[in-house]
Image: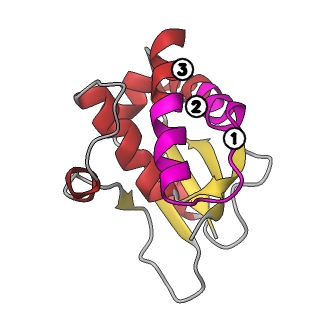
Amino acid sequence: MAHDAVFFLAPDGETAALARRRGPGQAFGSVACRFIEPDGAIAEWDMYFAEPSPEIPPLEQLLGWSWPEWVTAPLNDGVEVFALPQRLTRALAGASPTELEELAHRWTTRLRSAGEGEVTDDEPLAVLRGVARLAASAVSTGGGLYSWSF
């Protein structure tokens, strides 16, 4: 099931954990989206940069990938806060426009094949461009990149 999600900057995991109850708010740079499972997206993006290919890998390969770690333990309220892996943050920060476009196309293909809501062609690219800008900021400041969703 797709979630409302916000990718956001925070100086560290402890600060990111404070966003759990109400979301990151406006205190942090952020990118909001409404059509994804953030942990699956993070794994998909990480796999793309580790093993670049315009083709979507088999679902079994994605499910076997290293998924993001929770910043806080999950509760029964559906709220999740994940830390993006540092290698992914660095990869997004250094990604070329072509890489982001190829990843957006691959990600859109997977979302559509999984029936993940109404995804237009430009939504995933807009999200990726925004998250890449956040990643560049995280790398330059030494902070981290996180996702919050419900």
Gap between marks 2 and 3, in whole Å? 9 Å
Q: Along the polypeptide, which appears first: circle 2 or circle 3?
A: 3
- Which quadrant: the N terminus? bottom right
State the residue position of label 1: 30
Residue at the extreme front of the image, as rendered: 113
Residue at the extreme bottom of the image, as rendered: 76
- Relative to the observer, which residue lies in front, 59 or 93? 59
Is 4 on the left or on the right of 134, as rendered?
A: right
Name the spot of residue 34 as percent of width and height, x first: 71, 55
Front label number (2 vs 3): 3
Rendered position, 139 above or below 94: below
Residue type indicated by callout 1: Ser
State the residue position of label 2: 128
The answer to whether any part of residue 23 appears in the image is: yes
Q: Are marks 1 and 3 in contact (CB under 8 Å)?
A: no
Q: How is the image coloured?
A: secondary structure
Is 64 on the left or on the right of 7, as rendered?
A: left
Residue under the point 67% across and 73% down:
21
State the residue position of label 3: 101
Is 44 on the left or on the right of 119, as rendered?
A: left
Find out whether residue 107 is within the magenta segment: yes
Rendered position, 120 above or below 72: above
